[in-house]
Amino acid sequence: MVSKPLSALPHPPGRIPVLGDIRSADRRRPTQHEAELALQLGPVFQRELLGNRLIVVGGAELANQTLDERSWGRALVGPLAQLRELAGAGLFTARSKDPLWAQARRILTPGFSQSAMRVYHDAMASVADDLAAKWDASPVVDVHQDMTAATLEVIGRAGFSCRMGLLGRRDGAAEGTEQFLASLGRVLVWASESTNDVPLVGTVRELLGARRRNADIAACREFVNGIIQERLQAGDHDHTDLLGLMLETEDPETGARLPHHNVADQVLTFLAAGHETTAALMEVALYHLAADPATADRIASTGLDRTPMTYEDVVKSRQIRDYLNECLRLWPPAPGFFRVARTDQDLGGYHIPAGRGVFVLALAAQRDADVWGPDAHEFRADRFTDERITASSRKFFSPWGTGPRSCIGRQFAMHEANLLLTTLLSRFRFRLEHSDELVMRERATLRPEPFTIIATSRKS
């Protein structure tokens, strides 16, 4: 069968000559809108603005097809490309051909090994204990604020052996960290909205916002450079954390160390991507636990009362891991990624020429009812205990990206989330302060809008 041309791909209704699908543009919630379009238009469709065509893959079968590294590669476009202005050649934003990417990956890989995770565990546990102490003292919980604080503290303490000042003993670090978060938040919003804006309108917005954005990027870089300089000035070469690896380790292939500007790129990448994605995951998990106290009590009754939690305890807590995977399936913090055809491809009966990029919308593909069942758009706590689904070769579940450019910190993030959630669930009962639905906002990631829960001690 002859493949159809790209022009034959389904598109949103109401296309206007020259302007294209401007009526369906949504700069504030682009991937959620595209997931809604996928339900109407099918597993692969197009969106066009002023002649710029975006191919969206939202079906599990076709999404899986793009994961074949022999036929498809990673494309650095969209919000990640914009974030190069912030994170330079960090692991997420570096181009695959950049020698610094391969060098950094080789140097940092041991930092995410099982032996390294054992070392990080105690630092993570200290954050979990500080967070629980905060909830004991104040049961009305701003979940967004506390998950931001906890996940940033984990990266600071485990990755860089420094405190961010947001939990436990507050000190002079808190003000600088809060300013960093404010600047980072504005940059993330810009990265998402600027790549989903109407072209001409977006250009005007770019010009008007350039000064503020450049100041925010400079503030983020200054914060990161401060962390690095503090380590260098201390002259401490005994740290085995991520920062120590980057400063002291020679590349096993070239013998070179990472240049300091790239160390800053990597530190900024870990702070930004690491805290944002794990905080989003934790917020989704806490929302559903607070909305379903019976499930929360059932999970809490299955041996979560061991304190302190050891590394082995966390690794063995399969029930929490399955619960977190359902959160990642329904609301992946990274809602999609771009792939580029290495050679001419047929994708769902359409011809994708070599060099053409497509957007793999994990948010839609991980909700494909043909794979996950008729309730694919609903949260089901025990879904990942169903081996008929989880063992299926047809399922698409790729919340951490794919291939050699997948998230290097995924095991770090899952261990962290597992430990934090287990600690909180073993000590507290949760309920939503208001019966609001979960509303997601987009700023290069998918993360819930702020909400409040009431946390009461299980001992009371």
Image (cartoon, rainbow, N blue to C red):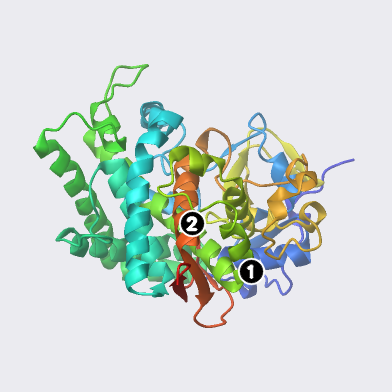
**Mark 1 highlights which residue?**
294
- What's the mark number on residue 421? 2
Q: Which x, y percent locates residue 29?
A: 55, 69
Give the total number of marks visible in the rendering: 2
Residue 443 visible in the shown view: no
Element under label 1?
A: helix
- Please indicate whether residue 423 sits to the left or right of residue 213 in the image: right
Q: Looking at numbered disc 2 in the image, what kind of residue is underneath it?
A: Leu
Element under label 2?
A: helix
Q: Which x, y percent locates residue 290?
A: 55, 71
Gap in angstroms between the C-alphas marked 2 and 1: 16 Å
Q: How many residues crowd mark 1 within 10 Å: few (<14), some (14–19), many (20+)?
A: few
Q: Residue at x 51, y 69 (%)?
A: 429
- What's the mark number on residue 243? none
Instruction: Quadrant for the N terminus, please.
Output: top right
Q: Looking at numbered disc 1 in the image, what kind of residue is underneath it?
A: Ala
Q: How many residues crowd mark 2 within 10 Å: few (<14), some (14–19), many (20+)?
A: some
- Please indicate whether residue 184 sits to the left or right of residue 408 in the image: left
Q: Which x, y percent locates residue 96?
A: 47, 34
Front residue of 359 and 159: 159
The answer to whether 239 is drawn above or below residue 390 in the figure is: above
Q: Which x, y percent locates residue 140?
A: 40, 77
The answer to whether 139 is drawn above or below residue 66 in the figure is: below
Front residue of 446 and 15: 446
Q: Quadrant of residue 377?
A: bottom right
